[in-house]
Image (cartoon, coloured by chain):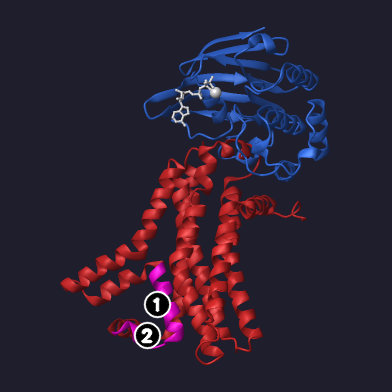
Amino acid sequence: MNIRNSKYKNLFLVSYLDLKESIRSKWFLIYSIVFGGLIALFFIAGVTESQVMGFSGLSRLLLMYIQITIVILPIFILITTVRSISNDRDSHILEYMLSFPISLKEYYWGKLLGRFITVYLPVLFAMIIAVVYGVTKGATVPWELFFLYIGLLFAMSSSFLGISFLISSFVKSSEVALGLAFFIWIFLLSFIDIALISLMLSQRVSSELIIFISLINPMEIFRVSAISLFDPQLTVMGPVAFYILDIFSQKVFVLLSILYPTLLGLGLAFLGNRIFQKKDLV
Amino acid sequence: MIEIKNVTKRFDKTISLNNITIDFNIGESIALMGANGAGKTTLIRAILGYYHLDSGSIFVNSLNPIKDRVEVLKHISFVPQLPPPIKLNIGELLDYVSISSDISIDLIREYANELKLDIDSNLKKSFFKLSGGMKQKLLIAISLAKQSDIIIYDEPTANLDPKAREDFYRLLEKSSNNKIMLFVTHRLEEVSSLVNREVYMDLGNVISDKKI
Ligand SMILES: Nc1ncnc2c1ncn2[C@@H]1O[C@H](COP(=O)(O)OP(=O)(O)OP(=O)(O)O)[C@@H](O)[C@H]1O
Ligand SMILES: [Mg+2]
């Protein structure tokens, strides 16, 4: 490790140490087991071999994986990172660690980078293992799908990490942070849908608006975009597809669903950084 | 030099620092005393740039500890009142301090040896799993190895056994020239041979300030 001379040495130092600490922790073990285990379960269930061997088998595996990821990944990211700064503040770790000449920017972004690597790598590895397994079984790898998924996962991880760090920067205690994170998860996962469905039924709001609102939810745009990879006409979504594909082509839509959550996460993280600098540290 | 001018810091209703004005100069060893809740820790944290003040200003070597935090903290060694539950292991903690502050790990090891703390056999141990006294010894060794011109200790001897306290004060006496040393303490008799200024605080005010 030769980071001593880099301009970003403190940033890398903070992320490297955070990464090491995370990898040793129990939550990381559970997290990796869940994602690794999921993939293993799919293999055992024989998803890759069902139907016609090859393309559709592996694609179905990825689709199932994506569906489960939508539910699990956000809550995992939220509960494991939302306390990263607030916990250090509560337990007076910040008081000591920040008595060394490290800028607050380096500390904040270093932590964020470390956490990003921790949450993204296991998910990525699970995908790679799935592909390797598929190849050894003689399947043709749907590379385009694979890379777009990796992009979508990256985007969703970014947006939730951004939400986490924003919360972490302003809450008073880590319990509150956890509660708030859980609420946001439930809210994005189902509450919005329920509210929007009832709005739709009452027919007082235009469908375009409702679709727009639902798609600014990073979980929802992830879901729709993932489905569109298999079903470019979005036929399973019924008339809603018409509105979406009327505005964007499917390709543009997928790109947007990678770009938007990434920028959203980055924006929220920047906001968190501002708050972190403006508030008392201990 | 540390210049504290008309500093007020409130937490909700509590006034922790009430319009405090005081300077600390090179060559001074200060015992900062006062009842629990007097505002000693708050004053120290303000010097370290952790608090946004309600009013007043603090300058450390003419620099603002919030705006120029990196420059200011290069000159300060600090040991907190309670060793925090850092999860890094000792080796990692040493990497953190040595890379961020250019502290020599060999020097830390030397000071640790003087305090009868064996670092090398504990390198893989989590910091928070050390005993209370071992934690304090390590933080003290780091603070001395940093060779700063400003040393701030918030009751660092609370967990040390009598022998370790002796070692600690012996080390300090050796390195106390041309520095500002600020000790928060409840036991003046322990530091009396070391200090040349006694400051008492109560309810956020400096109530007495004697040079001796
Ligand atoms: N983060 C905070 N939020 C609210 N109140 C605080 C905070 N930090 C300190 N205080 C209050 O400020 C006052 C001064 O506290 P401080 O820790 O400075 O006392 P102290 O002199 O160090 O006491 P001790 O000898 O017990 O360490 C106390 O009334 C305390 O409750
Ligand atoms: Mg105190």
Task: Out of B49 and A242, give the one closest to the viewer.
Answer: A242
Which class describes the residues within 10 Å of circle 2: few (<14), some (14-19), or many (20+)? many
Which chain hosts label 1?
A: A
Given the image, on which type of amino acid does mark 2 rest? Answer: Leu
Query: In what element is the residue under mark 1?
Result: helix
- For the N terminus of chain A, the image quarter is bottom right
Q: Subunit of mark 2?
A: A
Q: Residue furthest front?
A: A44
What kind of residue is marked 1? Val
Residue B176 part of the magenta-drawn span? no
Q: Please report the bounds of the magenta region as a residue range.
A: A219-238
Q: CA distance from mark 2 to mark 1?
A: 8 Å
Q: State the image quarter where residue B95 is shown.
A: top right
Q: Earlier in the sequence, mark 2 or mark 1?
A: 1
Q: Colour of chain A?
A: red
Identify residue for label 2: A234
